[in-house]
Image: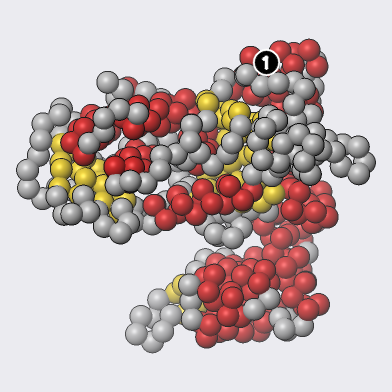
Amino acid sequence: MLRLSALDADAATAVRVIAHFEALLGGALDPVTLTRSTAGLAGCAAGLELPDGRTVRFAPDGAALAGAPGCVSGRVDLEPAGRVWLERPGVPGPFDELVLEWMAIAARVLAGRPRPARTPRAADPALVELVLSGREAVEDRARALRLLGLEPGTPLRVIAVAADTGADAGAGTGTDAGVEAVALLGRGALRGAVRVARVGSLGAVLVQRRGGTPGGEGAPGGEGASGPDGTCTGTASPAAELRAAMRERARDRGTARGPAPGTRVGIGSGADPLDAHTSWAQARSALRFAVAGARAEAVADHDELGPLALLADIPVERLRAQADVRRLGRLGDPAHGERGGPATGQARPGGELLAALAAFCRTGSLRQAAAELHLHHSSVAARLARVEKEMGWRLRDPQDRFRAQLALYALRLAGNAGNADKGDG
């Protein structure tokens, strides 16, 4: 049996975790088999509460456990009823969230939900780095593409994934970006040939959709499409699928104990596979515009950014020196918090001000911004009034709102500057 305690926390192991559950789904799965297998995989007790209230618990050695759960270290609720959980003493394991996600997926399949599409393939990082390099010989890049099972003559896109956990990756407490990419894409988010590897601190994803898929050859934005300047636009953008997968993961992780990692995704334009380094550079550039934890902005598509992508070419020092960016940065500093109500007197992070500002600039409506943030419109209005007072803006004025949006983009680019230098090319 696959046991995670004996394996490295990398993308290849994440694929093996998903494959473990896919194998269960391909057989005669029942609640007992699912729970016992999960406990053995995770190396700790696991439990499943069925929608009808029945509960199954197993120890990692396969022994059935009676009674109420012990220390629940992580859980996922099954809508409309039921839940799955792990009971791990001490610090959660590096794959506990992925195990819980897929245990929940399998439990939902037991209840009649459709199973996900096939998993992505973990690729040799050395081959992926070779494909993404703009300095290696064309022959070497073509050979690497073939070894990855990709076609040198079919356009592809490159996606960059960052796992912003706030943890110390060097101490081994952070989330591997390659693992995060596999976990996101393992839900069948993308069609076609999908290859995943960790490159530097980022997850790199190569996506190649061959003819016959929606948006295929000859269709606008499809495999054989080209831009007005003759450049290859490649495959249709996977932005919509990735955003849907992010929402689904956020829903599942919302009931997990402890903070969930913030994932950001940047999508490059379609490119000739031998020019994959161009799409990789665009993906890393788009990643700088993405906001972890922001449902509407966690995925940034270079094509959708349009001329805004040019802002990424401005030196970081100039962005940070701009007066609006400096003031907005101070406003968003956690130390620059709002005061809570008189009952609590607690300081709330200044990031709430920036979230309200971003939602209002994006929607142009106070009520739509409030709906997006799941707040009453009066709360959002109060935060925007604070921003106006501190920044000297009138956000109902289109010119000031445009200025605020530019300042937000510049602040993100300055804060995510490190992503521009991750990887070759």
**Where the C terminus falls, by quadrant?**
top right
Up-down relation of residue 125 to residue 14 (above or below): above
Local packing at callout 1 (Cα closer than 10 Å; few below 14, some 14-19, many 20+) is: few
**Against 253, is 44 above or below?**
above
* Residue at 25% across, 46% down: 85
Extreme residue toward the right, this view: 229
SS under mark 1: helix
> Where's residue 220, x and y in %?
79, 44
Which residue sits furthest left? 66
Is residue 314 at least partly visible in the picture?
no
Q: Nearer the viewer, residue 239 or 60?
A: 239
Identity of the amino acid at label 1?
Arg
Q: Quadrant of the N terminus?
A: top left
The residue closer to the viewer here, 218 or 423, is: 218
Instruction: Tell me residue 409's x, y (percent).
Output: 71, 60
Residue 326 lies left or right of residue 4; in this view the side is right
Q: Residue at x 54, y 51 (%)?
A: 244
Regarding residue 60, the answer to whether it shows in the image is yes
Disc 1 marks which residue? 146
Report the number of numbered marks.
1
Percent from the top left, x then y, of residue 389?
Answer: 66, 84
Relative to 192, does residue 295 appear above or below in the rendering? below
Residue 256 percent coordinates (x, y): 33, 52
Q: In screen coordinates, is 12 left or right of 95?
A: right
